[in-house]
Amino acid sequence: MAGRSANSYKIMYVLLVPFFLWIFAFLFLPAFSMFYSSFQNEGGGGFTLDQYVKALTNPLYSKAIGNSVLLSLVSSFVGIIIAVIAAYSFTTFSSRIRDRLLNVSNIMTNFAGVPLAFAFMILFGTNGMMTLLFQKLGLSFLVFDLYTWSGLAWVYIYFQVPMGILLIYPSLYAIRTEWKEASSLLGASTWQFWRRIGIPVLLPGIAGTFSVLFANSMGAYATAYALALRNFNLLPIQIGGLVSGDIFPRQELGSALAVILFLILVIAMLVNEKMLQLTRKER
């Protein structure tokens, strides 16, 4: 039996070899190449920090970093609020309706990129269906410019909400019905229950979901590029432009910006972990 068990482990390790090769070829090798390239002069050769100096001091790229961080914070904050409310409302329905709503959320999560941008153009573009309908009905206050910062923020919020629902929904089952009944018997209002019990219990899940939404928004490229082309200065769009290049690529500078993007996401994860630790101590 011992020999058969050892052989089973050997076979399992052999079967894992293609997986580790795939991870190395498509994850570690490109990451190492990007990191190495970010410390090279343009055209290659020689160790330098010039690419990071350009990335952080050039107004074009520093503004792109600021725009991406601000857009990600706003869309994640608004998205998590809507997601928490929507996910809680799901728990009030029967299991059949709840499963269907979760399936719809799952489908909406996969509806992103160029198709999402195209759909918003058809509905809320300058001559979009909903835009013309609102103007016809005299509801011009509902019309917004899709090709501005606020319009792009609404598009980001749209694809943040379904993901937030799927991530925060399991956390809602940590709130037991007995807690609500006990607080009600003790004379606590609904607001007091959520302020003192419900929200503190959900806070770790909310913080974790917020960090995922932030990372999802920071790395979004196809939707913003298809919607605003290069009229809106975002970090992923700048990275894509430098790597591909209209005239000639500047992969070294693009790699430096990609490393900065990675560091921003790492800092966001560390802040999230710190918040979770503080929450657990308070509880």
Image: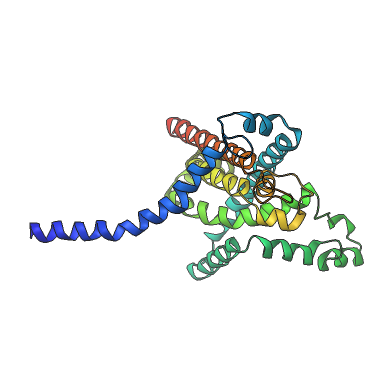
Q: Residue at x 65, y 45 (%)?
A: 239
Compared across the picture, whether 69 is left or right of 141 comes to left
Instruction: Look at the image and tell me in which quarter the C terminus lies.
Output: top left
The one nearer the camera, 33 or 26, is 33
Image position of 279 with respect to 148: above or below? above
- Residue 279 location (% of width, % of height): 47, 34
Total marks shown come to 0
- Residue 219 location (% of width, % of height): 60, 48
Instruction: Look at the image and tell me in which quarter the N terminus lies.
Output: bottom left
The one nearer the camera, 35 or 163, is 35
Q: Residue at x 50, y 67 (%)?
A: 99
**What colour scheme does the image use?**
rainbow
Q: Look at the image and tell me whether residue 263 can be seen.
A: yes
The one nearer the camera, 239 or 79, is 239
Q: Look at the image and tell me whether residue 181 can be seen.
A: no
The one nearer the camera, 125 or 209, is 125
Quarter-of-image position of residue 132 = bottom right
- Residue 84 location (% of width, % of height): 58, 50
Compared across the picture, whether 259 is left or right of 72 comes to left
Q: Residue at x 52, y 59 (%)?
A: 91
Image position of 99 with respect to 280: above or below? below
- Residue 39 location (% of width, % of height): 56, 33
Quarter-of-image position of residue 210 = top right
